[in-house]
Image (cartoon, rainbow, N blue to C red):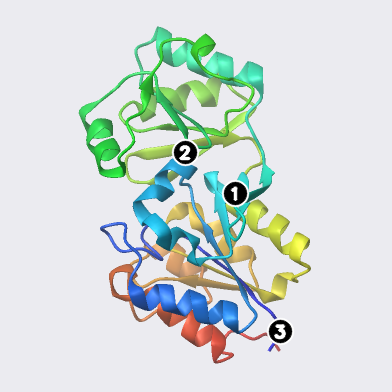
Amino acid sequence: MKRKLLAMDLDGTAVSDDYSLSKASEDAFALARRCGHVTAFVSGRRDVDMLSLKDAQWCADYHILNNGGKIIRCRDRKIIMNDCIGRETAVQMIRFASANDLQLHIVSGMTWQVTKMTEGTLQYARQLGVIPEVIHSPEETDCGRIEGFMATADLEPVAAYIDKEMPDLMYVHSEPGTIDIMKKGVSKWNGIAALAELLGIERKDIITAGNYYNDIEMIEKAGTGIAVANAVDRVKEAADYVTEHDNNHDAAAEIIDLMLKGVFDSE
């Protein structure tokens, strides 16, 4: 069996609804590594969001975060790629949100800032154990190192502004009520393809798995695209295989077991 790259979405796919990774899934990732394959978590999450997984986040070989904009090698925490938003674009976006009293999440590594605090954000932050800093102008952050933005409470006016005024940005709906905002051209698939090229793994040996609309491109373009049982219908339609189990019942372990049995080998 040739070496595979298994790139798996996190929320709604590899982790349960309580954001935990099961022991069975952790063991499956370890087995995949021992068998010579490469695994990656590919997610819209930022570094700070990975804290909810605690040490389990490092059971994969790589993190592909920020919807494909950042690649981290887990064994030594080395940043392999980091496609940041341009300084002028970041300044304009933060200035717009601050001037209009809109909430914008600003992310750079473990730095998490918001232009306005909401009760929902505070509740999530307490779960992570990290409270974001509230800022009111672009001068209060390093606009040359911003990896991405996110909008939740005020996503509609933020998205409308990007559509009209920000040609260097794009956004995806990563879950209901949330948009992730990245530099134009960033995508989960582009991050996966960059990692595969670095590792010398052909497209036919890339396996991807996901559950939501922002996973469709990587599912369609991989050698094998997988939808978990709880995926939205559009993702299932795009997939080559749909799991029997959902994210709350070890879909990740099922996928790795089938991969190791050669079910996804190309002819």
Tag 1 residue: 68
Question: In the figure, 239 relative to 94: above or below?
Answer: below
Which disc, if any, is residue 2?
3
Q: Amino acid at mark 1?
A: Gly
Regarding residue 200, the answer to whether it shows in the image is yes
The location of residue 237, given as percent across then percent down, is 47, 69
Would residue 88 appear left or right of 122 to someone viewing this image? right
Q: Contact (CB < 8 A) between labels 3 and 1?
A: no
Quadrant where the C terminus is found in the figure: bottom right
Q: Amino acid at mark 3?
A: Lys
Q: Nearer the viewer, residue 31 or 154?
A: 31
Q: Nearer the viewer, residue 17 or 126?
A: 126
Outermost residue toward the front? 76
Q: Contact (CB < 8 A) between labels 2 and 1?
A: no
Give the CA separation, mark 3 to mark 2.
Answer: 34 Å
Could you tell which of marks 3 and 2 lies nearer the N-terminus? 3
Question: Which residue is at 69% across, 59% downward?
Answer: 195
Give the CA separation, mark 2 to mark 1.
Answer: 11 Å
Quadrant where the N terminus is found in the figure: bottom right
Which disc, if any, is residue 180?
2
The location of residue 233, given as percent across then percent down, is 38, 64
Q: Nearer the viewer, residue 74 or 183?
A: 74
Question: In the figure, 172 relative to 236: above or below?
Answer: above
Give the CA separation, mark 3 to mark 1.
Answer: 24 Å
Q: Nearer the viewer, residue 215 or 199?
A: 199
Neighbour class for label 1 at 10 Å: few (<14), some, many (≥20)? many
